[in-house]
Each structure stands twice: as structure tokens, then as C-alpha cells.
Image (cartoon, grey):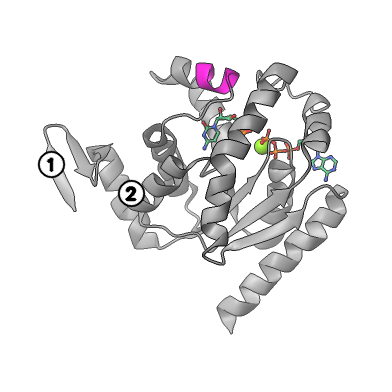
Amino acid sequence: MWHRSSEVFVLMGTAVDAATRDTNGSLIEKNPTVVFVLGGPGSGKGTQCANIVQHFGYTHLSAGDLLRAEIKSGSDNGTMIQNMIKEGKIVPSEVTIKILQNAMLESGNDKFLIDGFPRNEENRAAFEEVTKIVPAFVLFFECSEEEMERRLLGRNQGREDDNIETIRKRFKVFVESSIPVVEHYKSRGKVRKIDAAKPIEQVFQAVKTVFTVHNDKAVA
Ligand SMILES: Nc1ncnc2c1ncn2[C@@H]1O[C@H](COP(=O)(O)OP(=O)(O)OP(=O)(O)O)[C@@H](O)[C@H]1O
Ligand SMILES: Nc1ccn([C@@H]2O[C@H](COP(=O)(O)O)[C@@H](O)[C@H]2O)c(=O)n1
Ligand SMILES: [Mg+2]
């Protein structure tokens, strides 16, 4: 239930401004298909999402990429987001959800891979509460920390968080905050686990099977 509270609308304790409420109304009408793509830092989420887009017509929304774009745009939240990313911390849900909602609406598509979100229980509960969207399934890339660390240190994309100190913090946040989200969806039969330690092409073969089965079920 929505309550008007001066300039903001409050839904079950979540403060959302009027623009977000309007965006949300349009999103609900679209009834989009959402797949959450989760896995540790460097497990290969972005790499595989690029392949899925080519084969299955989804729009790829990386929460991390969108937050980095928000920093570059000079937004009021830029400095706060930059500090959180440098420390491997999770940005408050209301900020990330608003950015995701806008990106979903702007895309014009109705099928989304949401990569790196939800990162914690607060992200998960707030997204479901605000958008009313339940994911079709959760693609979960499983990989050892040793392999993920090797990949991140070799990535060379100039990311401020790809240094050993921040990488260790990101691993800790992943274990403590993100794994419980995976467990939540696992208990609801929504998790499709992929062995992400294999070479890129082999990982994609397994990913393709998941999406093909999903599509076959949708038309059956
Ligand atoms: N299966 C794989 N085998 C070896 N290297 C891989 C594999 N998948 C991705 N990589 C490489 O590992 C690095 C990290 O991959 P990617 O950026 O896709 O990970 P990510 O899960 O999106 O990471 P982050 O959470 O930090 O955004 C990249 O340099 C990528 O080329
Ligand atoms: N839901 C999210 C997603 C990301 N962040 C922050 O961005 C950093 C990088 O994310 P990647 O998915 O690109 O690795 C991450 O460590 C967080 O600081 C977030 O706050 N919330
Ligand atoms: Mg990524």
C-alpha cells in the first residue's frame, strides 16, 4: 500500500519519490521477464551476458556498470557511489533500483538480464517490493576464489576495485551478503547453477541449455 508523505511516497517502509512511482507504473504494465545473474566477482557474469544477448534477445543491465555510469554522469550520488565501490560495499537499494528501473524503461525491451543484482537481502526485498517483479530464474555462476582472483587481476579494464585489497573485501561481501540471496532463491527452486570455472565457450554451452529449457517451457 502506498502512502503519501510530503514529497515522497512510502511503500512498506521503502521511500520512493514520485518519479520512481511513475516509472514503476509503466514497468508493471510491461510485465517484463527478468533473469538475475549472480556469482562472485570475476566469475564471468558480464562475459556470459554478452553471449546471452546475442543468442536470446535479452537486454543486459549490469548494476555495477550502471553505477559506474552514474559516477561519470556527475550525479549528486556520484561521490557516495564511488566511495562504496572503492570499498567493495553495497550501494543503498533505493539508488540502485531507481537506476535499474530507468534503464529497463529506456531500453524498450521486455526481457532483462540483471547482472550483479540483488547483491544482498535489502536489494532483493526492496526490488520485489517496489517493482513487484519476481525473477523467472537466477543464473548462478559458481567459481573458486582462487580462479576469480586470477581473472580480476588480469582483467585490465582500469576498474578502481580490481586491486587485491578491494578484491578481498568484495569476496567477503559476496560470501556474507550475496550467498544468502542465492540461498533464498534456491529454496524456491529458482537457481540454475553453472560451473563457471570452465573455459568461456564451455560455460556458454551450459548457459544455452538453461535458456533453451526455459524457452521451451514458456511455449509448452
Ligand atoms: N570462463 C572463463 N575463463 C577464463 N577467463 C574468463 C572466463 N569468463 C570470464 N573470464 C575473464 O575474467 C575476467 C572477469 O570476467 P567478467 O568481467 O565477465 O566477470 P564478472 O563476473 O562480470 O566480474 P565483476 O563482478 O567484477 O563485474 C575478464 O577478463 C574475462 O575475460
Ligand atoms: N547491486 C549492486 C551491484 C554493484 N554494486 C557496487 O558496484 C561494485 C562493482 O559491481 P560489479 O558487479 O561490476 O562487480 C560492487 O562491488 C559494489 O560496490 C552495488 O553496490 N550494488
Ligand atoms: Mg561484471
Q: Which residue lies at the image location 78% right of the left edge and 62% below the top edge? A: 206
The prevailing secondary structure element of the residues shown in magenta is: helix
Label 1 beta carbon less than 8 Å to ligand 2: no
**Residue 49 image point, x, y percent:** 68, 49
Answer with left or right where residue 105 lies relative to residue 44.
Answer: left
> Residue 84: within the magenta?
yes
**Residue 75 image point, x, y percent:** 42, 20
The stretch in magenta equals 82-87
Q: Which residue lies at the image location 54% right of the left edge and 62% below the top edge? A: 187
Answer with left or right where residue 155 lies relative to residue 85.
Answer: right
**Residue 172 to residue 14: above or below:** above
Q: Label 1 sits on what residue type?
A: Arg
Q: Which element type, helix, strand or loop, lies under badge 1?
A: strand
Q: Which residue lies at the image location 52% right of the left edge and 18% below the top edge? A: 82
Any mark on residue 4, and which?
A: 1
| Mark 2, residue position | 130
Q: Is 207 in front, or is 57?
A: 207
Label 2 beta carbon less than 8 Å to ligand 2: no
> Residue 152: within the magenta?
no
Does residue 116 appear in the picture of this structure? Answer: no
| Residue with the most extreme bottom position | 220
Q: Label 2 sits on what residue type?
A: Val
Quadrant in the picture for residue 19: top left
Quadrant placement of the C terminus: bottom right
Q: Is 215 in front, or is 136?
A: 136
